[in-house]
Image (spheres, rainbow, N blue to C red):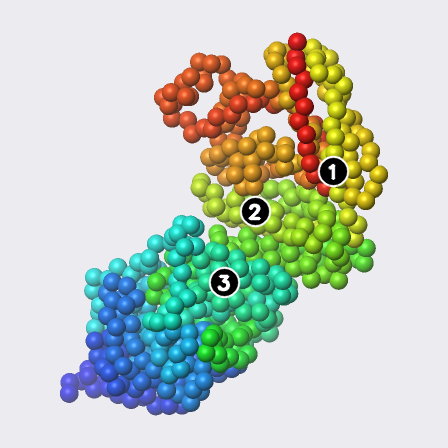
Amino acid sequence: MNYRTAIVATVALLNAALAGAGQAPPQDVIFPLDQVQPGMRGKAYTVMQGSEVVPLDVEIYGVLRDFIGPRKDLIVGKLVDERTKFTGAVHGMSGSPLYIEGRVAGALSYRLTQFEKEGWCGFTPIADMIEVGEVHGGTSRRTSRLGLERGEKRLAGEGGVGLPTMANAAERAFQFLPADSGGFRPLAVPVTIGGLGPKMFEWLRSEFAAQGFEGRLLPVMGGGGQEAKPLKGSFEPGAALAAVLATGDIHMAGTGTLTWRRGNRVLGFGHPMFQNGKVAIPMARAEIVATISSYLMPHKISNTRQVVGTIQQDRLTAIAGEIGPVPPMTELNIRLRSPSGERKFNCRLYQHEAMTPAIAASCVGETLMESMDYSRDFSLTLRGDIELKNHGRIHLENFYSGSESEHYGPAREIAGLLGELLDNRSELPQIERIAVQLDLDDKRRQTHVSEVYVDRDKAKPGETVKVRAVLKPWRGEQHVVTLAFDVPENIRSGELDILVGDAAAADALDGKSGRIRVERPQNLDQLVSVLNRRRPHNALYLRVTQKADGIVVADQRMPALPPSAMQLYDSNRTMLEAVRIERVDVIEKRLPQNAVVRGSQTLKVKIE
């Protein structure tokens, strides 16, 4: 035995002694993948309750080649510990480090089927996890290189790049955890959600599934953040690690296990969370309240403690981060005023393109749905701002009233606006603050446009046209309102279309339906401008239009273009990214109402 081999063997024996004591051994050496043999015994380190790291006995069965991906193998084993007799590998154990002969070999990351009873599991090789930091900057090149050299083997020629993020449509069709009963699947990340009642929890859970995260993320109701009550002890391999999605009055965090630490650099999970590549997710410690045994969905439930740093990489074989600075989060401030008084709710949100709209909406919805002020019939004024770094703000102003389903209106509106902002093709915005003020009472204020009259069917330029609308309030007496406009002097002869109605009908004239509109903003400032033109529901709109050809370029309308310009556009000889329109606005007026307006009618006046 040469000197170097003797040193490695001695270190391994010392590490094995520490392993028997329940503390994860040091990680100065790794156990090379090519030395993994069937029949070997090992230990995986995790937290079953509280913050104490405990060892779990593992029996090794071999290696599945190319299982995780090309040249990305999976160590197959069984948990044979008394502690896991009724649980097997549970969701939340992702990242629990595996040691063989006192040297770190990998991280617990997969389990076999939902109803498996013998503790079958899979481990991501530690070299593939280290590669995440080495290639993408999540772990120090120097220390990871040192660890590989001391392990006496360095894997070469492996790119370490995760699978590409899928487009929404494909993502929703693809299930990372299919609902079949066979094969190894990655352990899900339990996302403990505190502060949401059953209704909003179920809605948010459906949003997780709709975004393609079913099987990757496991929403669990209950548990919250306790940043002011830090966990004692060291943050070492085997400890619970949380990725914070929201914190404050409403709290959400996905919990797994810390696998590897070198100085302030850490690796965990052994599989992705969102698989978004480069990220900036607040990283926190967690306290495990209990490990739940279940043949269907065994999992850990937890409270999140102090935030300690940033998760910087979310890749195929690991998440990687650094203890230290904490990334900025979006402030969400909600103020609810009602006849019973005023209450405030404050949260901070991780900005994620798919989930931030749903998380913010669930916070707003919870404020309304689980409030002591809730009543079936209600009226609600929404005001506020979405503040963007370097790009101004989007103003919130709307009115909702009606029955139960309308309570979700403000949440849907905020989710839609955030979705458009984060899904824009020009620039990823930094949302600094979302300020929401809700004024609520228990009266239903709705009115319906039942009839519309115009005082003439012909008019000349310069003349005044009067339009009368009959409004029928909810359980109230109908009344007549009058809107008048002067026909412009420069109007062309022909017919004017006069629309009197609600915001939806007025939007439809612009080619808008939900998030679909004819404007195609070319940068974030243009998108902000378009979103600030939204029409609130508590107004009666008069829109006078006339048939005329034109186009919309970016966020600007160019109506009534001369035939030569339209001929050039129609010939496809221009590089303009534009949409054709066939009407020009003559006049638009808004008559505010203390009620949600529904219904519309259109009349015609001939210009002589």
Residue 361 lies in quadrant: bottom right
The residue that mark 3 highlights is 282
Where residue 27 sits in the image (x, y, percent)?
33, 78
Q: Name which residue type carries label 2.
A: Gly
Q: Residue furthest left?
A: 1
Up-down: is 450 above or below 210? above
Q: Name which residue type carries label 3.
A: Pro
The residues tagged by marks 2 and 3 sit, at their Cα atoms, a distance apart of: 25 Å
Residue placed at 66% from the left, 12% from the top?
Answer: 607
The residues tagged by marks 2 and 1 sit, at their Cα atoms, a distance apart of: 26 Å
Mark 1 and mark 3 residues within 8 Å of each other at the beta carbon: no
The residues tagged by marks 1 and 3 sit, at their Cα atoms, a distance apart of: 48 Å
Where residue 428 sits in the image (x, y, percent)?
47, 46
Identify the secondary structure beneath mark 1: strand
Task: Judge left or right: residue 191 versus residue 319.
Answer: right
Sequence-wise, which precedes: disc 2 or disc 1?
Answer: 2
Task: Judge left or right: residue 31 versus residue 94.
Answer: left
Tell which of 451 and 540 is nearer to you.
451
The residue that mark 2 highlights is 416
Disc 3 crowd, CA 10 A, few/some/many (<14, 14-19, 20+): many
Where residue 256 sits in the image (x, y, percent)?
45, 71
Q: Name which residue type carries label 1.
A: His
Where residue 569 sits in the image (x, y, percent)?
42, 21
Tell which of 226 and 491 is nearer to you.
491
Disc 2 crowd, CA 10 A, few/some/many (<14, 14-19, 20+): some
Q: Is residue 200 visible?
A: yes
Task: Judge left or right: residue 444 versus residue 241.
Answer: right
Q: Check the picture and name the quadrant holding the C terminus.
A: top right
Residue placed at 79% from the left, 29% from the top?
Answer: 481
The residue that mark 1 highlights is 448
